[in-house]
Image (cartoon, rainbow, N blue to C red):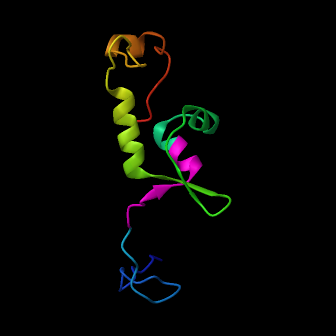
Amino acid sequence: MTKRKPLYRDLDQRQHRPRRPKVKPLALLPNEAAETLRISRSTLDRLGVPCVRLGRRKVVYPTHLLRRWLSEQAAPQAGSSNGVMDQHEATEDHDDEHLDH
């Protein structure tokens, strides 16, 4: 017996309403920001990545601030590499690591 395909693919089967289009978030939660930057949560806190506090407890990382901060970190400063490595330096110590791509 084969399964029948739903007639209305754009309807949420449970609520019978049109699905909302996915919206890119304006800000990320701390764990999401750390995962996006591929660093740990503690490293995120230590590096002073720009964030916004909403109320007493909620902290979010606006995506435009994350992009700007990352660009600033990558920009070479006079007299220091500021952590920027060329391709050879970046892969030299990580020969055993594999990318998820």
Q: Is residue 32 magenta?
A: yes
**Residue 8 coordinates in the image, percent (x, y):** 36, 85
At a point 49% along the width and 21% down the height, the residue shown is 97
Q: Is residue 44 above or below residue 60?
A: above
* Nearest to the observer: residue 45 or residue 56: 56
Q: Which residue is the extreme one toward the right?
A: 57
Residue found at x 36% / y 80%: 9
Say which quarter of the image contains residue 10.
bottom left
Residue range in magenta is: 23-34
37 in relation to 77, above or below? below
Is 50 left, or right, of 79 in this rendering? right
Q: Is residue 27 above or below residue 1?
A: above
Residue drawn at point x = 53 percent, y = 49 percent: 32
**In the image, 46: left or right of 62?**
right
Is residue 60 a member of the stretch shown in magenta?
Answer: no
37 and 22: which is toward the camera: 37
Q: Residue furthest bottom?
A: 16
Q: Nearer the viewer, residue 69 or 2?
A: 69
Q: Quadrant of the C terminus?
A: top left
Residue 72 drawn at (x, y percent): 36, 32
Picture coordinates of residue 35 (x, y %)? Answer: 52, 42
Q: Quadrant of residue 46?
A: top right
Number of numbered labels in the structure image: 0
Q: Measuring 35% from the left and 27% from the top, which residue is drawn there? A: 74
Q: Is residue 79 above or below residue 42?
A: above
